[in-house]
Image: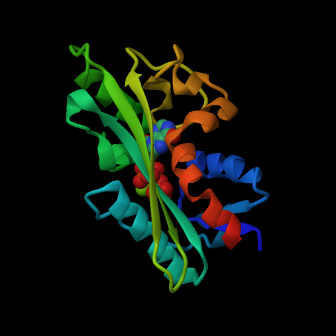
């Protein structure tokens, strides 16, 4: 088998995983490609790790197959690490990337200290084995205004350290070489290669 199920409904993430896993010859499937009727797993945890584990183990138990989940978000230092685990719904229950970015920019309007990081915790749940959890980060700062149209989520307002463009102005290849998702994946790549 060289297939892996990703317990996510986020199209941006699923596309990044498709690209990241292509180098290993692993074909990935988002949860909706497997079964459209699978409900959202409630993200009741207080940490990225708790939520990633919850998503991976719930779907792995349902399908009785190995499943990878990603819980991720943006931590802004001047906002005491918000939006953090609430990144997807920071501006309200309906997921709205533009409203989320506007809220962060408004909260930072008078703030010069704009350091931030993207965080990704990956959970690999394999039926009847202990779930593997790994964390990756990407350090950077929050721009004054959105720029760029690539990527998803907060990419248009996040400038990675060492760049003077936002993540949304980088190509997908450039993002995938430095992203929090890539950095977390590096830590479990051997396990995944052995498994699939
Ligand atoms: O839970 P799933 O179905 O995977 O999809 P989601 O969008 O709800 O995912 P999360 O619960 O992990 O929330 C992550 C949010 O953090 C933000 N985020 C995560 N990774 C990002 C990235 O690479 N670039 C920009 N924003 C990102 C974005 O707003 C996401 O919606
Ligand atoms: Mg989610």
173 or 185: which is nearer to us?
Answer: 185
Q: Is residue 101 visible?
A: yes
* Ligand 2 found in image quarter: bottom left
Residue at 66%, 34% in the rendered image:
172
The image quadrant of residue 154 is top left
Residue 65 in the image: above or below residue 165 = below
Residue at 71%, 47% in the rendered image:
19
83 or 164: which is nearer to us?
Answer: 164
Of the 4 image quadrants, the one containing the N terminus is: bottom right
Residue at 53%, 77% in the rendered image:
60
Q: Is residue 30 visible?
A: no
Residue 179 in the image: above or below residue 63 = above
Task: Where is residue 150? Give x, y as percent.
Answer: 61, 30
Task: Where is residue 79? Give x, y as percent.
Answer: 22, 32
Task: Where is residue 108? Give x, y as percent.
Answer: 25, 21
Of the 4 image quadrants, the one containing the C terminus is: bottom right
Residue 146 in the image: above or below residue 100 = above
Residue at 53%, 60% in the rendered image:
8
Task: Where is residue 46? Give x, y as percent.
Answer: 25, 58
Answer left or right for 95 relative to 63.
Answer: left
52 or 177: which is nearer to us?
Answer: 177
């Amino acid at each position: 088998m060289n297939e892996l199920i990703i317990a996510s409904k986020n199209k941006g993430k699923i596309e990044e995983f498709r690209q990241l896993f292509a180098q290993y010859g692993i074909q990935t499937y988002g949860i909706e490609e497997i079964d459209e009727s699978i409900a959202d797993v409630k993200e009741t945890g207080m940490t990225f790790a708790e939520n990633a584990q919850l998503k991976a183990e719930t779907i792995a138990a349902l399908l009785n197959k190995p499943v990878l989940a990603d819980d991720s978000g943006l931590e802004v230092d001047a906002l005491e690490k918000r939006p953090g685990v609430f990144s997807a719904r920071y501006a309200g229950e309906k997921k709205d990337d533009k409203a989320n970015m506007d809220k962060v920019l408004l909260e930072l309007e008078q703030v010069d200290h704009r350091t931030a990081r993207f965080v990704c915790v990956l959970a690999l749940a394999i039926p009847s084995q202990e779930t593997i959890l790994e964390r990756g980060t990407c350090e950077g700062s929050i721009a004054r205004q959105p720029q760029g149209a690539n990527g998803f989520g907060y990419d248009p307002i996040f400038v990675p350290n060492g760049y003077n463009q936002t993540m949304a102005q980088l190509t997908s290849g450039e993002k995938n070489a430095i992203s929090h998702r890539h950095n977390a994946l590096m830590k479990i790549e051997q396990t995944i290669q052995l498994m699939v």
